[in-house]
Image (spheres, rainbow, N blue to C red):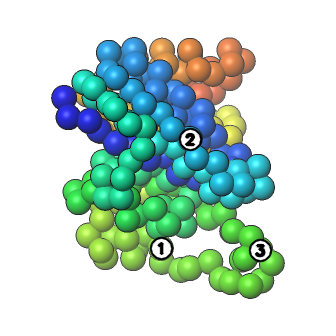
Amino acid sequence: MQTKNIMIVGVGGQGSLLASKLLGRLLVDEGYDVKVSEVHGMSQRGGSVVTYVRFGDRVYSPIIDEGEADFIVSFEKLEAARYIKELKKGGTVIVNTQQIDPMPVIIGNAEYPAGVLDEMKALGVNVDDIDALSLASQAGSAKACNIVLMGRLARYFDIPREKWEVAIEKCVKPAFVEINKKAFGLGYNN
């Protein structure tokens, strides 16, 4: 199998590292060679966080080069726009419609750009947008946006939903497994 490339992008504290751990665990369990690389950019202060997940028969590097991402899973609209150049032609961006203002917007030095998703769509990008925050809240925790997005990503894979749920059981603290399974299902079905 040719190597597949997934970027998970977001803002510090959104759970992108758990999402990459879940995805990596699932793919290892499926027998793939998997490489995961995490790039933290001031993640503890609400800055950008990027994780690369590469899998296939044999993967030699954890880094995804510009224009090679099959999927970008974005936890926030502006983060999707920031990394769109990493997407390969025909790739898909799965994006949470949530808006998290970056520091320049918070302090009044800039405005959050309007129409970010519409601009990406106008460029011909495959945009799969989902209100992950509302679905996570419906599942029982706003913090489960990451798992809602993994549920949406799962729709693009030929891996049974039950196997994703086993990976959730392996990666999430027992007290939060049921909420996360519900969040995954809402992302998968909506």
Amino acid of disc 2: Glu
Q: Residue flagged by tag 3: what amino acid is it?
A: Ile
Q: Residues within 10 Å of mark 1 (few under 14, many from 20)?
A: some
Q: Indicate which disc, 2 or 1, sits on the residue closer to the N terminus.
A: 2
Question: Which residue position holds label 2?
Answer: 38
Label disc, if present, on residue 146 of the rendered structure:
none
Relative horizontal placement of residue 31, taking residue 175 as reference (left or right)? left
Report the disc number at residue 106: 3
What's the residue type where badge 1 is placed? Val
x and y, in percent, of residue 185 in the image: 47, 31
Find the distance from the CA under tag 2 to the CA under tag 1: 25 Å
Left or right, 81 with respect to 66, comes to right
Query: Where 80 falls versus 50 (above or below)?
Result: below
User: Which residue is pictured at 72% across the width and 54% down the height?
Assistant: 42
Determine if residue 98 is in view.
Answer: yes
Task: Using a 10 Å C-alpha cutoff, classify the residue at mark 2 as few (fewer than 14 neighbours), some (14 to 19) or many (20 or more).
Answer: some
What's the residue at 25%, 24% (across, down)? Answer: 57
Q: Is residue 2 left or right of residue 86?
A: left
Q: Secondary structure at mark 2?
A: strand
Residue 18, x across and y down, in percent: 60, 33
The residue carrying mark 1 is 116
Q: Is the residue under label 1 in contact with that under label 2 (CB below 8 Å)? A: no
- Residue 187: percent from the left, percent from the top? 46, 40
